[in-house]
Amino acid sequence: MIKILAVDDEPGICDILKKTFSPIGFKVLTATNGPDAISLVKKEKPKIVFLDIRMLGMSGFEVLTQIKKIDKKIKVIMVTVLGDDQTRMQAKALGADEFVTKPFLSDSLEALVSRFVSDLIQEESGHAEG
């Protein structure tokens, strides 16, 4: 079972992601702050992370940097109300795999996750080496 981690300081967003992905076969973990998210990444090893940028304490950019240090293969989707180019470029520079602005449609997130799952299956079967 593929694990997804939803990280947002708004518990409602985590709930939406859980309700979207749990019924279709994913184990969805949630965290409402950066330190909890990093701890879950180390312990649970999710394959996909939805990560809010603007959080109290530790920003999503800081969390992203730590996640990529732990495992650069984890697919990180930045989720934010900030849709400007500078924020997007900063996220990409730090290793974000995708960028989604709030409010988002669950269907578009499902399509994104489906694409990542296909990539993960190919990587694990050895087709994406080198």
Image: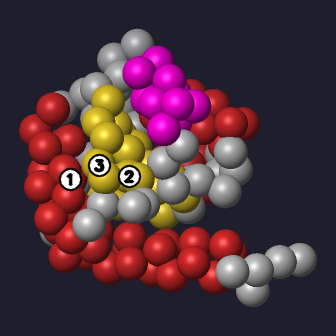
Distance CA(mark 1)–CA(mark 3)? 8 Å
Callouts 1 and 2 close, C-beta under 8 Å: yes
Residue 25 higher or lower than 27, as above or below = below
101 relative to 98 in the view: left or right: left
Q: Between disc 1 and disc 2, whose residue precedes?
A: 2
Where does residue 10 sit, x and y in percent of width and height?
18, 31
Where does residue 6 sit, x and y in percent of width and height?
32, 43
Q: Is mark 2 on a helix, strand or loop?
A: strand
61 relative to 81 in the view: left or right: right
**In which quarter of the view is residue 106 placed?**
bottom left
Single out the mark in the foreground, 1 or 3: 3
Q: Name the residue under label 2.
A: 4
Where does residue 89 sit, x and y in percent of width and height?
58, 54
Distance CA(mark 1)–CA(mark 2)? 9 Å
- Regarding residue 59, the answer to whether it shows in the image is no
Residue at left offset 21%, top offset 70%: 24
Q: Residue 114 carries which label?
A: none
Question: Residue 28 or 86: which is nearer the viewer?
Answer: 28
Magenta span: 35-44
